[in-house]
Amino acid sequence: MIIAVDGPAAAGKGTLTRALAEHYGLPRLDTGILYRAVAAALLADGADPSDAQAAEAAASTLDLSRFADAELRTSGVGEAASVVAAQPRMREALLLFQRAFAARPPGAVLDGRDIGTVVCPDADVKLFVTASAAARARRRWLELRQAGQDVDLAAVEADIERRDARDASRDAAPMRPADDAHLLDTTEMDIEAAFRAAVAIIDAARG
Ligand code: CDP
């Protein structure tokens, strides 16, 4: 079974897909980390994240062990990742890896922006997880503070709104719900409620 989970920044896809992966006994791929790692590699090498050739080269030689998870989770790397991610050839370089991950039995839970539309258009179940910008900003702000980053809530909200606008308006695999995606708005839900709602959708979709 392949479960595709897409949605805007800080919608809670990470927490949700970890819980779903455990519940259904499937491996999980956070595809955002791939884009973040390519961005971090460019920044570390002093390259410009909008340099399409450098981005494609970095994606083709991606070494995920080069960076610690916390280094990849900063808002600076998130912003650079969204600039990098607008480039079609670098996306192409990451596509095979993602599809191969999903194709291995017994399937997988993948989270990203284009899983239901491009990476796994035939996924068994597709979720598009959203929440209001204010709710998402608050969650990301708490997450960053817990990780020891001193950030301003208004700045976090402005960051994720700018990134969402870029991700949704790009030509290459823009962020959008697949036609057959189930929308899940978690604005008023805690983690447990969002998990239960997602399981209800997935179990109903599997019949
Ligand atoms: O964790 P958060 O929701 O803030 O972002 P992420 O999932 O780590 O993704 C970082 C950036 O990578 C996004 O803003 C997108 O520009 C890009 N991305 C993408 O284009 N396609 C994906 N499948 C996943 C991420």
Image: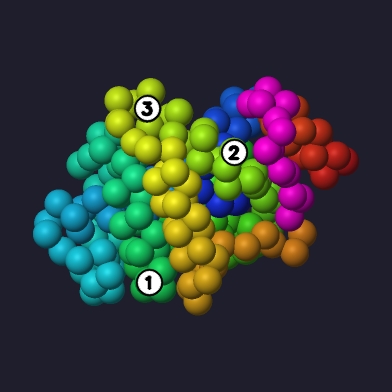
Labels 1, 3: front one: 3
Which element is circle 1 on? loop
Residue 171 visible from this viewpoint = yes
| Marked residue nearer the N-terminal end (1 or 3) | 1
Q: CA distance from mark 1 to mark 3?
A: 31 Å
Q: CA distance from mark 1 to mark 2?
A: 29 Å
Pointer 2: residues within 10 angstroms few (<14), some, or many (20+)? some
Residue 122, disc: none
Q: Is residue 83 left or right of residue 173?
A: left
Question: Which amino acid is tagged 3?
Answer: Arg
Could you say which is closer to the camera, residue 62 or residue 79? 79
34 above or below 91? above
Within the magenta stretch, is there residue 188? yes
Mark 2, residue position: 135
**Residue 11 is drawn in which quadrant?**
top right
Q: Quadrant of the C terminus?
A: top right
Question: Which amino acid is tagged 2?
Answer: Ala
Could you say which is closer to the camera, residue 148 or residue 117? 148
| Residue located 26% across and 64% down the image | 49
What is the x, y in percent for residue 191?
63, 26
Residue 145, disc: 3
Mark 1, residue position: 87
